[in-house]
Structures are given as structure tokens and as C-alpha cells.
Image (cartoon, helix red, strand yellow):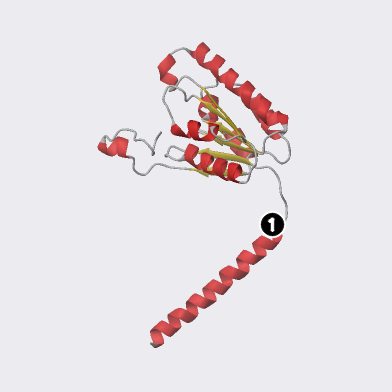
Amino acid sequence: MMQNFRGESQHQRQSQKHKIAFEEKLARATKEKGLLIVNTGTGKGKSSAAFGMGVRVIGHGLRLGVVQFIKGALYSAESDLFKSFANCEFYTIGDGYTWNTQNRNADMQTAQRGWEKAKTMIESGDFQMVILDELNVVLKHEYLDLGEILKVLTNRPPELHVVVTGRHAPAALTEIADLVSEINCIKHPYKEQGIKAQKGVEF
């Protein structure tokens, strides 16, 4: 019993310290602004995390814009779901994996169409969040001008959240971002077990 009492007492002291630290941080967090959020890394879940935030935006009755780069060759159920909401505009402007077309000029033109749509959304002031899915991949392959994109993102409306996903985020983008998450792969069923993409998990 004495050992349990000491353990409980120590737990209470630690909990109290955590509570005080949390309340101090909470008291200092008084600002609000639109965030530039980057989800990158080689692991699965970057787009899924972005769409989770998108669901929250829709749930609050706010307006969401989505532009999917690269994707387009394969069906994904999230596009059907998001398009069913009146307060969401969702565009998939891509031809699939970068090795599908084997045509750099075509890929650049497709990426430019997607960026023009994204730029219009960002600059309009009509949205509370814009998700730029797989934009990092487009930037890695230099299909778009990074300088222009950084300029538009930096000068976005003050209250607009922008979420950029995709592996290999450029350093210049992560440097200006407010929130950067790197998702790394530890195990993947496709690589380790030869399990194909499955409904509800990958699409």
C-alpha cells in the first residue's frame, strides 16, 4: 500500500506540473492567423491528414477548396464525398503518377492548370482553407515556378489556412510554413507483404 501511495503521490505532482505548464502556454497563445501547413515525408497519411482538417472546416460550416495535383488516373472516394458538400470546391487536375505520361511538357501544362485554379481560390478571399494535395511532388519535378508559388502563399489572405501535401517538400516552403509535419514510413503492407491498395484505406 505504501508503494502505491508513493506512486500516486508522484503521479499527482507530475500531473500538476504538466497542468501548470499547459495553462501557461495556453495563456500565451492569444493570436489568430491563417496557417501555412505542410505535410511531407515518405510515409502514408499526408493527404489523409489534410482531408481530416478539411472535414473539420466543412463541419464548422466554413468554405473549403481542394486542388489535387498529380492524382487523377485512379479513383478516390474522398472526391465524391467532398463534392457532395455545398461549401466545398474540389478539383482533381492530374494525369496520375509522374511516370505515366512520360511527357514532361504535358505534365507541366497540367500542373499549370491546377495552379491557376489554386491561385484563384487562394486570392479570392472566399475560402477559409485551401488544400493543395501533392503540390510538393509537382515542385520536386520543377513543373511549376517555386518562386511564384511562395509569393502567392506568403501574400495569401490573413485568415486563410493553406495545406500543402506530398513528399520532398522544398526547404524554401518549409521555412515559411507555420506547421510542418514529416510522416515517415516504418512498415508498409505493399512493400513487405505485396498487399495491393485497398478500398477505404488508399482510395
Vertical arrangement, residue 187 with respect to residue 69, above or below:
below
Expressed as whole percent of the image width and height from the top left, the position of residue 17 reads 58, 72
Location of residue 142 (image quadrant): top right
The quarter in which the N terminus is drawn is bottom left
Q: Is residue 167 visible?
A: no
The residue closer to the viewer here, 100 or 120, is 120
Q: Position of residue 136 (x, y in %)?
A: 53, 30
At mark 1, the secondary structure is: loop
Q: Residue furthest bottom?
A: 2
In-front residue for pair 94/4: 94
Q: Residue at x 72, y 52 (%)?
A: 31
Q: Could you tell me which quadrant the C terminus lies in?
A: top left
**Where in the figure is residue 118, as x and y percent of width and height?**
62, 27
Between residues 3 and 123, which one lies in front from this camera angle? 123
Amino acid on which disc 1 is placed: Ala
In the depicted structure, whether residue 17 falls above or below residue 80: below
84 up-or-down from 184: above or below: above
Q: Which residue is mark 1?
A: 29
Determine the image quadrant of residue 56.
top right
Whether residue 3 appears in this view of the structure is yes
Give neighbour class at mark 1: few <14, some 14-19, many 20+ (Cα, 10 Å).
Answer: few
| Residue 29 drawn at (x, y percent) | 69, 57
Closer to us: 54 or 144: 54
**Across the whole image, how many numbered discs are drawn on residues?**
1
- The residue positioned 64% from the left and 43% from the top of the image is 61
Q: Residue at x 46, y 12 (%)?
A: 103
Q: Residue furthest left?
A: 193
Q: Quadrant of residue 175?
A: top right
Q: Give the residue at x 28% y 38%.
A: 192
